[in-house]
Amino acid sequence: MNNSTSDETSTVDPSPGPLHQGMFGTYRITATDRREVMAYRICLLTMAVAQLGLLMQWAWAGPTWIGPWLVLMAIALGLALHWVHIYLRPLHQALQLLWLLGVGGAIILAHGAGPAQMGKTLLAEPLWILAIGPYFAALAGLGFKEFFCFRRFEAASVALLLPSLLLLALFGVVPLEQQGALWFLEAGLLLVMAVGKFWLDPGADIGDKSVFEELERRRHAGAS
């Protein structure tokens, strides 16, 4: 079961697909729905590859000039959160807000430390984790969403590892420079989760659209 916040296209879908029976009525999975699911999956994969690239550069060349990878990760996660299908609008908006706060924190870090020194500053001053942490909280939220919908081990592992590693570094229990293997593990699991999405039918990511339509109807009825 998955979630949806997508608005229906106003044009006639040339390939509307079969009629499905949902909890609150019938619905169709449209070509627009399928395009949004593919966009979400591509963004998820891009984010996973970018994080792995950042970690490889950090391991082999040191923590300088990681900014371009962070930019790619930020764009990929932002777009993934735009296209992800989530029934509950407040939850969807909360994840987007966390992403925005994390991106804002990274911009402040880049301005204060300089784009080339962001990684070194994180190592020297772990309190900066509070600035960028919301970004990873949003990514962990996607992991929880994927686990809730598909019961995938790698999704649960990503959702648990991300906050655990950041909190351990923030409180000085296990500094970032000693977490390399665990970050590679998390990135590998994220990549497995992202690649595995492409074997699923798009309908699995869309879920029961009648639930979304009913929630929207109730929301509009309450606002009127």
Image: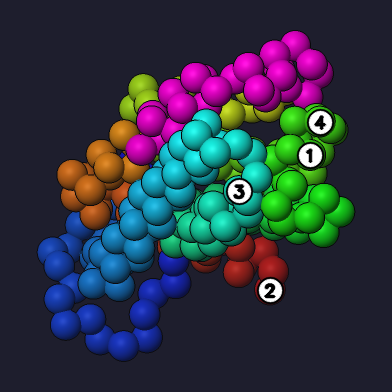
Q: Earlier in the sequence, mark 4 or mark 3?
A: 3
Magenta region, residue range: 168-191
Which amino acid, by three-letter code, is at mark 4? Ala
Kindly identify which numbered label has been placed on residue 224. 2
Local secondary structure at mark 2: loop
Local secondary structure at mark 3: loop
Q: Which residue is mark 4?
A: 124
Residue drawn at point x = 31 percent, y = 88 percent = 11
Kindly identify which numbered label has been placed on residue 66. 3
Q: Earlier in the sequence, mark 3 or mark 2?
A: 3
Which residue is nearer to you in this view: 176 or 151?
176
Q: Quadrant of residue 121?
A: top right
Which residue is nearer to you in this view: 123 or 45?
123
Local secondary structure at mark 4: helix
Q: Which residue is mark 1?
A: 121
Is the Cβ of the residue at disc 4 closer than 8 Å to that at disc 1? Answer: yes
Q: Is residue 50 visible?
A: yes
Residue drawn at point x = 34 percent, y = 53 percent = 41
